[in-house]
Image (cartoon, rainbow, N blue to C red):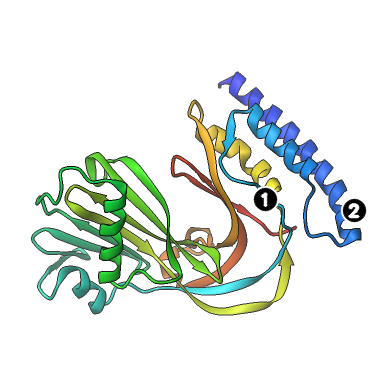
C-alpha cells in the first residue's frame, strides 16, 4: 500500500470535511436571508485548496444556488433500417449483429449506442488542422441527421486513441442539452484524421415529461470538494486543469439496478454537476440536496 498517497487522500478528506462544515453553517444564514449566491470568501477558500494540490482552474466556479425539476427521458433507438441505410447504403452484410460493407462497419449496443467505423484507406489530406476536422465532422453529422440546435460541439481532443488509429487524431465531443442545460449520459463522439471521419459513437435521449416538484441543488464548490479525491487519484502524477464546471442533468443506464441494463428504455435524469478536465476526462457529481 502507498502510505504517502493514502495520507494525502486522508488530509484532503479532512480539509474537505471542514470546508463543507463551514459551508453548511453559512448556508443556514443564506436561507434565512433568502439569498441565491454563495459568498466570494468561500469560493476563494475552495480555489486556494485546489491550488495547494496543484489543481488549476481555467474557468469560473458558479456561485448560483438553484432548484431544478427532475426530467424523464427515453433512449433513442438507433437500430432501424433508416439509420443503417444512412451509414452503409442499401447493400451490406449482417453477422453477429455487426453490419458491414467492404470498408464500413456499424454496430448497436442494446439499440441505444450507435458505433460506426470506416476502414477506407484513401487519404483526404496529409495535414489536417482542428478547423478542418470540425468542418468534416459537422458535415458528416448533418448528413446522418445527428446535428441540431440541442447537440453542440463541446470539446476537441487531439491525441492517440488506439481503438481507431495508432497515430494521433481528433476526437470531437458533442453534448446534448435540454433547455440550455447539458444532458448526460448522452453524447456524440466523432473521430477524424487524414482519412476523414473514421469513427463515430452516439447515445441520445428524447424528453418524455417533466416532474412538477422542484428540488434544491448543491453548489459547484461543494461538488468540486466532494469529487477532488477521485480527480487527484485518477490523475496522479499528471497535470490537472479544470476547464468547465456546469449544472445540468444526468441519466446513466448502468446505474439502474436491473438484472440486464440492456432492457432499460427510459429513466429519470437527475440534477448533476459536470466537471471537465483539459485532458478530456469528465466527472459527474450528484447535485441533489440530501
Residue in the picture at 30% in, 66% down: 141
- SS of the residue under disc 2: helix
For mark 1, what is the residue?
220
Residue 148 place in picture, x, y as percent: 39, 71
Q: Which residue is mark 2?
A: 29
Q: Considering only vertical position in the picture, is 239 above or below 214?
A: above
For marks 1 and 2 on the same chain, the one whose residue lies earlier in the sequence: 2
Image quadrant holding the N terminus, namely: top right
* Residue 104 figure quarter: bottom left
Q: Quadrant of residue 203?
A: bottom left
| Image label count | 2
Q: Residues within 10 Å of mark 1 (few under 14, many from 20)?
A: many
Q: Position of residue 253 (x, y in %)?
A: 48, 62
Residue 276: assigned label: none
The location of residue 154, given as percent across then percent down, is 44, 55
Query: Who is closer to the viewer here, 263 or 137?
Result: 137
Residue positioned 51% across, 35% down in the render:
234
Residue at image coords 77%, 55%: 37
Query: Residue at 61% across / 78% down in the picture?
Result: 210
Residue 85, by quadrant, is bottom left
Question: Which residue occupies the foreground of this view, 174 or 20?
Answer: 174
Question: Residue 20: x percent and y percent?
Answer: 78, 43
For label 1, the SS is helix
Amino acid at each position: 500500500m502507498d502510505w504517502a498517497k493514502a495520507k494525502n487522500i486522508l488530509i484532503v478528506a479532512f480539509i474537505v470535511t471542514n470546508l463543507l462544515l463551514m459551508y453548511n453553517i453559512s448556508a443556514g444564514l443564506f436561507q434565512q436571508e433568502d439569498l441565491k449566491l454563495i459568498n466570494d470568501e468561500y469560493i476563494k477558500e475552495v480555489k486556494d485548496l485546489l491550488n495547494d494540490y496543484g489543481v488549476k482552474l481555467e474557468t469560473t466556479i458558479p456561485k448560483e444556488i438553484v432548484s431544478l425539476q427532475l426530467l424523464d427521458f427515453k433512449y433513442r433507438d438507433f437500430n432501424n433500417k433508416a439509420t443503417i441505410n444512412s451509414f452503409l447504403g442499401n447493400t451490406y452484410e449482417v453477422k453477429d449483429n455487426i453490419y458491414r460493407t467492404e470498408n464500413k462497419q456499424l454496430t448497436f449496443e442494446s439499440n441505444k449506442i450507435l458505433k460506426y467505423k470506416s476502414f477506407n484507406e484513401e487519404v483526404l489530406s496529409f495535414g489536417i488542422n482542428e478547423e478542418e476536422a470540425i468542418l468534416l465532422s459537422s458535415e458528416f453529422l448533418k448528413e446522418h441527421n445527428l446535428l441540431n440546435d440541442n447537440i453542440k460541439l463541446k470539446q476537441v481532443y487531439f491525441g492517440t486513441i488506439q481503438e481507431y488509429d495508432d497515430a494521433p487524431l481528433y476526437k470531437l465531443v458533442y453534448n446534448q442539452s435540454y433547455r440550455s442545460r447539458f444532458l448526460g449520459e448522452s453524447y456524440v463522439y466523432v473521430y477524424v484524421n487524414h482519412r476523414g471521419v473514421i469513427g463515430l459513437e452516439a447515445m441520445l435521449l428524447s424528453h418524455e415529461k417533466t416532474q412538477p416538484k422542484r428540488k434544491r441543488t448543491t453548489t459547484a464548490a461543494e461538488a468540486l470538494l466532494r469529487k477532488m479525491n477521485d480527480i487527484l487519484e485518477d490523475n496522479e502524477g499528471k497535470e490537472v486543469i479544470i476547464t468547465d464546471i456546469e449544472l445540468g442533468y444526468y441519466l446513466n443506464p448502468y446505474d439502474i439496478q436491473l438484472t440486464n441494463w440492456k432492457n432499460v428504455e427510459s429513466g429519470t435524469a437527475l440534477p448533476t454537476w459536470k466537471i471537465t478536465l483539459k485532458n478530456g476526462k469528465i466527472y459527474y457529481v450528484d447535485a441533489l440536496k440530501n
